[in-house]
Amino acid sequence: MLDVRNVTRVFGTNRAVDEVSFTLHEPGFIGIIGRSGAGKSTFLRLMNRLTDASEGEILFEGEDILAYQGRAARSWQSRCAMIFQQFNLVPRLDVVSNVLHGKLNRQSTLATMFNFWPRTDIMHAIDILERLGIDEQASKRAEALSGGQQQRVAIARALMQDPVIILADEPIASLDPMNAQIVMDTLKRINVEDGRMVIANLHTLDTARRYCDRVIGMRDGRIVFDGTPDQLSTDAAREIYGADESFNEDATSTAIKPSQAPTQAAALGVAAQ
Amino acid sequence: MPTVLPGSLRPNTPGGIDIRADYLTLTRRRRMYTGIVLIVFIALFVSGFRIADMRNAGSFADGFAHVLDFPREVVIEAWEKAGNLPGHAARAFPALVETFNIAMVSTIVGCILGTLLALGGTRGLAYWPRLIPLMRRTSDICRAVPEIVIALVLIFVMGGGPIPAMIAIAIHTAGAQGKLFSEVNENVDMKPLEGLSSVGANWWQRTWLGVFPQVMPNYLSYSLLRLEINVRASAILGFVGAGGIGAELRNAMTFGQGKFDEAAAIFLMLFATIVLVDQTSSWMRNSLTEGRGGQ
């Protein structure tokens, strides 16, 4: 389904992403972990085509998405949604407008300027907000919402794109633990219920263990770990983060109850349906 | 052991012997520099004044006494014929509307052109990043040429009337607003733009939804400020043959005695208009910046 081959991005003399290769055969929930500057964000930006790669190819269903230019690249972006740490909504516009932006690639410029959206699209946007439990905020300005709500609006925008892949760049790094759990549960639900592939950069190990089907560890632009959450031992984590014996992941853990079963989130999602 | 000793009892450290004397020397030197600068300034000022005075038709000392002669004549005559003022004002009113319309049209056209120049000249927002220097130099040139120069050339080419004035003011406005707007653009938060990029929006969609909502209050505020300036500019351009209230005022003033009441009426009306535009636009600008919760 997704075949990443020797993808490299060089900034000056710094190899931010260095010969990254991996293959995914089914739409799972993939977590990428690593310390700041390991190249996680750059890799997601390469996949979304916000940044151009220096070398390598990413084959999605046989087509090299890194070779797309102009209109084709924008069309790929509309199928490969991205969620950001800082939400990246338009703060002055209302929530529904922000969700409708997910359709921009299929909307003419003129229609955009006159703020003309088909009625069905508007209804669909509100349906998505309802599914994520924030339909009451529909007419508020995005900037009036809390961080957790804004991130859910960003997820709604991503869903509006009807994407095959959702990339999430540190989606919970600026949220409190409670909102972080809501956002991660939502992403997991989308993964399980809709069968959309989710690739998320995560900054805590317990989140990666709890939600991911597969964890990729990056260090200095290279993949240093690729396996299941069970294989992600403390020793493996030390290797990924380049830490010594003093490294203790509990010190920075944001989990409220570390003992919660990983499958519970998915079960919650199904029950809510 | 005492922590603070009186000055006379303090042991002299090498080099620190005359802190006081050193400081006084420093003060003397500073005073001397100030004195030299003052003398040079006065010398330049006096010599400059004498050159200017020699090249004038009459001497400054003689002329200075007559500086209020012309205003006095205008005021006396206008006062004598005060009853005519409303009539003159009513007759000149269409010309005032023409002046205001010149200012409005040129502000709107100039601000739209300025917006395009600013978007094209801002790093990170430009459609063609390679053309950024060209866009910036274009707005520099538009801004550098005074509108009266453009107007004089256009009046020579096209004949008098409001159109040359409009084009002249619009060109200058485009340059000035291009500069101001691009400074607003520098401060645009790129995060919403990145979000719009990530969904596959094209340049126009990104600009329309990501940039304009952020910059609009500032753009409007600068445009209102420019409208104030352009009302004055358009009145002045009337003097060089661009029609409107400026032309009426020049006719009345150059006719001399006998028409000073008309000149006074026009002048009062122009003054009132400028005050009105200034006050209205500053009120609107305040409500733009404060009404939105201090963004």
Image (cartoon, coloured by chain):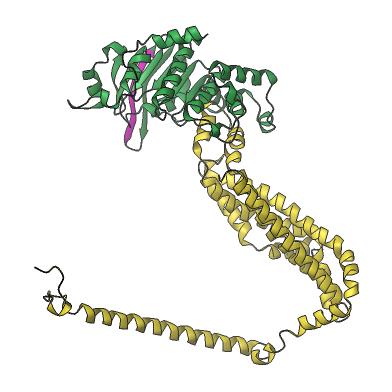
Chain colours: A green, B yellow
Say left or right for A48 vs B275. Answer: left
Specify the quadrant of the image occupied by residue B149. bottom right
Quadrant where the N terminus of chain A is found in the figure: top left
From the top left corner, tell me how far across and down residue B22 is, in percent: 23, 79
Q: Which residues are magenta?
A: A13-23
From the top left corner, tell me how far across and down residue A254 is, in percent: 34, 24
**Can I make out residue A61 in this image?**
no
From the top left corner, tell me how far across and down residue B148 is, in percent: 70, 65
Q: Nearer the viewer, residue A246 or B115?
A: A246
Asked if B276 appears above or below A35 in the picture, the reply is below
Specify the quadrant of the image occupied by residue B98. bottom right
What residue is drawn where x is 35% and y is 14%?
A210
**Can I make out residue B118 in this image?**
yes
What residue is drawn where x is 30% and y is 16%?
A226
From the top left corner, tell me how far across and down residue B119 is, in percent: 58, 44
Asked if A229 appears above or below B28 in the picture, the reply is above
Say left or right for A170 vs B70. Answer: left
Instruction: Tell which residue pokes out farthest to the front in this image.
Output: B2
Examine the structure image and report whether residue A258 is included in the region drawn in magenta. Answer: no
Q: Nearer the viewer, residue B195 or A131?
A: A131
Say left or right for B136 vs B13. Answer: right
Say left or right for B92 vs B43. Answer: right
What residue is drawn where x is 71% and y is 85%?
B67
